[in-house]
Amino acid sequence: MQNISEKIESIITENKIVLFMKGTKDFPQCGFSAMTSHILGQIGVEFKDINVLEDMEIRQGIKDFSDWPTIPQLYVDGEFIGGCDIVKEMSEAGELKELFEEKKLINQ
């Protein structure tokens, strides 16, 4: 049986872009998750959404895993990018799209 850290590690490893969020990309359940999901949609990337409200172990586990206290949390290519504020700032500066282009993760 996997512990929560191993489970999170495998989710991040198996998916190029992962957003740990409250709710889903189709039905976000908090404003910050909605905004982050919307930004990713505007850029045009496919991402795996993990609803932390469905699994309390993951909800706490992802905070411990990343040493980041809030949800949502975005991972790209196995790397922790940040939460809503960082994603928003990177998007506004054009850095988020650049990151996805560099990693060839934008749908053409």
Image (cartoon, rainbow, N blue to C red):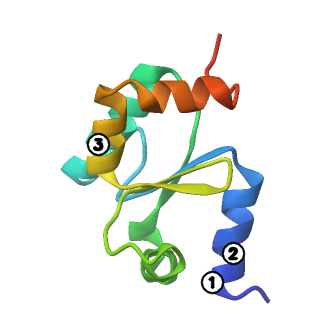
The picture places residue 100, in percent across and down from the top left corner, at 58, 29
Name the kind of residue labelled 2 in the image.
Lys
Residue 36, relative to residue 73: is it above or below? above
Would you identify the image quadrant in which residue 8 lies?
A: bottom right
Residue 41 x/y as whole percent: 43, 27
x 26%, y 49%: residue: 85
Q: Are marks 2 and 3 in contact (CB under 8 Å)?
A: no
SS at badge 3? helix
Disc 3 crowd rating (10 Å Cα; few below 14, some 14-19, many 20+) is: many
The tag earlier along the polypeptide, 2 or 3, is 2
Q: Residue at x 35, y 59 (%)?
A: 22
Residue 52: assigned label? none
Whether residue 77 sits left or right of residue 53 in the image: it is right
Does residue 100 sit above or below 24 in this rendering? above
User: Of 29 and 37, which appears nearest the observer?
Assistant: 37
Q: Residue at x 31, y 68 (%)?
A: 70
Position of the N terminus by quadrant = bottom right
> Marks 2 and 1: in contact by CB < 8 Å?
yes
Q: Quadrant of the C terminus?
A: top right
Whether the residues at callouts 3 and 1 have beta carbons within 8 Å, the answer is no
Instruction: Give the labeled residue for mark 2.
Output: 7
The total of numbered circles placed on residues is: 3
Q: Nearer the viewer, residue 13 or 23?
A: 13
- First along the sequence among labels 3 and 1: 1
Residue at 70% across, 49% down: 15
User: How many other residues sit within 10 Å of disc 2, few (<14), some (14-19) or many (≥20)?
Assistant: some
- The disc label shown at residue 34, or none: 3
Residue 4's label in the rendered image is 1
Disc 3 versus disc 1: distance between alpha carbons? 25 Å
Give the x, y percent position of residue 66.
50, 73
